Amino acid sequence: MKSKIIAITMGDPAGIGPEIIIKAMSEGELAGIPAVVIGCLQTLKRIQALGITPPVELKEIHQVSDAHFSPNVIHVLDEPLAQPASLVSGKVQAQAGDLAYRCVKRAAELAQAGEVHAIATAPLNKEAMHMAGHMYPGHTELLATLTHSSDYAMVLYTDKLKVIHVSTHISLRKFLDTLNQDRIKTVVNIANTFLKRVGFDNPRIAVAGVNPHAGENGLFGDEEINIVSPAVKTMQQQGLDVHGPCPPDIVFLQAHEGLYDMVVAMYHDQGHIPLKLLGFYDGVNITAGLPFIRTSADHGTAFDIAWTGKANADSMATAIKLAIKLA
């Protein structure tokens, strides 16, 4: 069987993306993996010239089929910056946001054409992308648009804790105003399908409540009574092993200790805070519901340490490994 190839997107070139990509791919078990980097070749070479990454050959290719994988070589599909010499590390810039967008777009096109089989993305900066005119809240929504996917959700993934989100990049007020049974049922279905794909034969899914103590029978809010509980019961009637609404202050610990295989979090921070507390460096962000696997380092662009050699590449390496495993 022909080896499956993944694409790795640079993210915002002014952030730590270029550095952690080179670090992750140049040493250990990821050296020589079947992966191509989509990004600005000149920026990668600027990072390398700083002496903050291991020495490795950055080899330009013009199409995926040109790549012949071996240790100490990173194959790059060049997606050049408009003005590469003027790029400033650690600063929000329109050309950097545009590059991040173009890298993701090209990767999605290659995945849909079958030339690559999964995507691992380095972090982008939403403000920079918006400055360039690409008005997406983040990778998840951008990839959903590029692939015309309507049923998708953000998954945060570690060995011991896996979280999927009903909502992500919207305000709490908008979340409360738009929460509905159909979205919860959709996310539970996505969770069940995703877990089966990664090896769970009979997924156990917990649905977190919205309010403190999951509403305390209406004492602290009625979203659990009117929205969450009916959705959970419907999914149970369809044969899924789903539980809830569960008190949000204990359900993530219960999942971490093995009682559940995944938690359905209601909003961004409800899911992100426990996951990042328990697995910041080995956590991976996955977009479930796309026609291909997409993983990402579960942190931001870290402009404050960009191009200094201080960036930790563990999460990027884990994202790449998981993309290869699931491709």
Image (cartoon, rainbow, N blue to C red):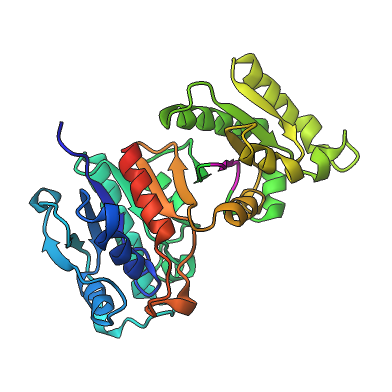
Please tell me which residue is depicted at 10% across the width and 51% down the height of the picture.
68
Q: Nearer the viewer, residue 311 or 127?
A: 311
Q: Is residue 98 visible?
A: no
Whether residue 141 sits left or right of residue 238 in the image: it is: left
Task: Give whichever of 318, 44 is nearer the camera.
Answer: 318
Residue 160, given in percent of the width and then of the height, sits at: 55, 42
Position above or below: 208 against 21: above
Residue 155 picture location, percent across and down: 51, 43
> Residue placed at 47% from the left, 71% from the top?
302
Please tell me whether residue 166 belongs to the stretch shown in magenta.
yes
At a point 28% along the width and 77% down the height, the residue shown is 47
Q: Quadrant of the C terminus?
A: top left
**In the rendered view, does 260 fall on the left or right side of 76?**
right
Which region is colored magenta?
A: 160-167
Q: Residue at x 13, y 64 (%)?
A: 59
Residue 189 image-quadrant placement = top right
How far across and how far down the image is residue 202, in percent?
53, 21
Q: Is residue 261 magenta?
A: no
**Which quadrant would the N terminus be assigned to in this image?**
top left
* Left or right position of 62 against 163: left
Q: Nearer the viewer, residue 73 or 268?
A: 73
Image-quadrant location for residue 78: bottom left
